[in-house]
Amino acid sequence: MAKDFSRLEDSNRSSNLSIHEVSDPARRRWLHGSAGAAMAALFGAGASGLPGCGALGPPQRLGPAAAPRLGFEAVPPSRADTLVVPPGYVATVLAPWGDPVGLPARMPAWRPDAGNSAEDQAAQLGMHHDGLQFYPLEGSSRHGLLVLNHEYTDEGLLHPLGTRPDSPQGVRKSQAAHGISVVEVAWHDGAWQLVRPSRFARRLTARTPFGLAGPAAGHRLMRTAGDPQGRTVLGTLNNCASGRTPWGTYLAGEENFAFYFSGGDRLSADQKRWGMARQGFYPWAAQDARFDATRHPHEFHRFGWIVEVDPMDPASMPVKRTALGRAAHEGAWVAVTRDGRAVVYSGEDARFEYIYKFVSRDPIAPAGRGLTAAQANRELLDHGTLHVARFDADGTGRWLPLVHGQGPLTAANGFADQGEVLIKTRQASDLLGATRMDRPEWLAIDPASRWVYCTLTNNTQRGQPGRPDVDAANPRAANAMGQIIRWQEDGDFDGSTMRWNHLLLAGDPGNTRPEARGDVRGDFFGCPDGLLFDDRGVLWIQTDAHAAQMNEGEFARIGNNQMLACDLSTGEVRRFLTGPVHCEITGAAMTPDQTTLFINVQHPGEPPSDVSRPDAPQQYSRWPDPAGGRPRSATVAIRRQDGGVIGT
């Protein structure tokens, strides 16, 4: 997540029990204390100050790889309007907002005055880059496809002076700047470059047709005047993090979709539970009737899904996989059971929402008989069981199945069938008593140790009047700094139970407030967001503090958002890079040989408030072009100058 939509997305008013209410009174008293007391009660007296040293012990890789893995010189915190990498590394801007993606028939050049039309924007890289993945062509580490999300738009940057973003042309341009881009990249003459034109180049926007598949496809709550069959949706919105499947496709989450809809004066209980407002954050409803929920209430149900894209087939229709549940999905990440089935983990980046796991019914099919692996598995994610997580106070947890007819998920409680359970995933999770989390964002799965990691970015409403108290998994009140939780399934990835602890609590040890100090060993930080495991077992962590937080109060010493590396064998965290002013560091992918790291710098120069600034686009940042133009989100390629492995 980038813009602080979390202040708006706080709609879980369910009465499901907290961990305190299902634990014994003695343990309950411990958990109401400080973060250190909570950790001590849960894991033993020495756990609170040592990341990775809970009762389960740190997951370690054995053999030569267990030696210290961080070979770069840490960079200090920064407030500079530039991207800083360690000595011996070089960072190159590769794919900024507004550059043409390489469609053979249309390659409109970027206009620094934001004068490009909506039609131009539909052929250019979208705005506010987020999750991304690298897909090698023929196994190459020097030639492949980058697929990346464009989470949202800053209307004050997107349009030239005097243009009303709620005009028909303005709304069309805003919709064209959302979605997903596919670009071809190659290493040429000592640098990464976009290949243009490219037969793979593609833009998916808020107006691109997407198929619906799985139990909710064709459901009565998915049918609209424009799509009476309920099987085709125009567009994808607010795409945040991304995952890559073993069969070669791309998974993107539709996160804060609720803010695009206007619900009028009579919001239903369902609309309120999902955070719809009387007037949408974006003024689309006046120009595109789909987003006027008073006229088309079912259109709202057609967003909030995991989207699957085949990047190798530009003619294929992307699909929204409803079996994975509807949520404010940050993204989706795939593990594989020992018998070959897919397990998809996801979370909702919203206050007091949930973590999910989907287990496919069938094993992953190999390519063959004229089908690519993507084609052979085009229905794999349509059949299986979705679960929601409950983290118990004793360091164990359980996955609760979201299955119609089981427990309270019946017609009497508002769930007519499995399709309705999936459309109302939040309400179903409320009834099952899932654990309300502190904004679960990215996940990363260590294939060697089989531990799953999840960033809980922050939740300043935790423990405040009228909101849920602290609990074992979310142990700090007014949690401005966030934490990283991890778990290991009992048995296999499809297990119904797990054991869990925290890798770390983020924060600055110099802060006065105990809840903001954290227990990071090494370079401190706040608001963990993006995660990536490299092939050596190093966990890379990216941060997303909001512009209004940066360099103020408890964030005064932390500086701009950054990317760090955590050596799980020692617990050390080391700062690898810092970004320009007010940006988020997000998206991370490496080439197969681990010599290039691709990241995204999102929304440099974002205003501390949500007020647009068409009269001062360069007020806070000029990155990546200090000489002029507008600040632009961009994909960056990072390499060691000697061509070695990143991080060594």
Image: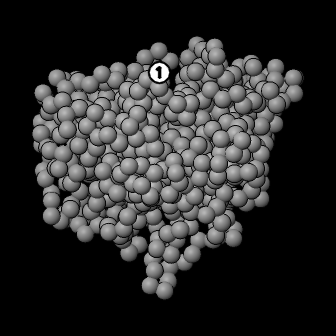
Position of residue 318 relative to residue 607, above or below, is below
Where residue 402 sits in the image (x, y, percent)?
68, 49
Badge 1 element: helix
Question: Quadrant of the rendered structure where residue 334 is?
Answer: bottom right
User: Could you tell me which residue is drawn at 15 percent across and 59 percent down?
Assistant: 106
Q: Is residue 322 visible?
A: no
Q: Which residue is mark 1?
A: 555
Q: Is residue 467 visible?
A: yes
The residue closer to the viewer here, 305 or 269, is 269
The residue closer to the viewer here, 380 or 157, is 380
Residue type at mark 1 is Phe
Where residue 431 sits in the image (x, y, percent)?
71, 37
User: Could you tell me which residue is drawn at 17 percent across and 65 percent down?
Assistant: 104
Position of residue 243 relative to residue 624, above or below, is below
Colouring used for the render: one colour
Question: Quadrant of the rendered structure where residue 503 is?
Answer: top right
Callout 1 crowding tier (Cα within 10 Å): few <14, some 14–19, many ≥20: many
Q: Is residue 30 left or right of residue 163?
A: right
User: Could you tell me which residue is drawn at 16 percent across and 50 percent down?
Assistant: 120
Q: Is residue 420 left or right of residue 217?
A: right
Question: What is the residue that sits farthest to the bottom in this orientation?
Answer: 369
Tell me the quarter of the image containing the N terminus: top left
Position of residue 19 relative to residue 253, above or below, is above
The residue closer to the viewer here, 331 or 602, is 331
Where residue 440 sits in the image (x, y, percent)?
57, 38
Position of residue 467 relative to residue 593, above or below, is above
User: Could you tell me which residue is drawn at 46 percent across and 74 percent down?
Assistant: 375
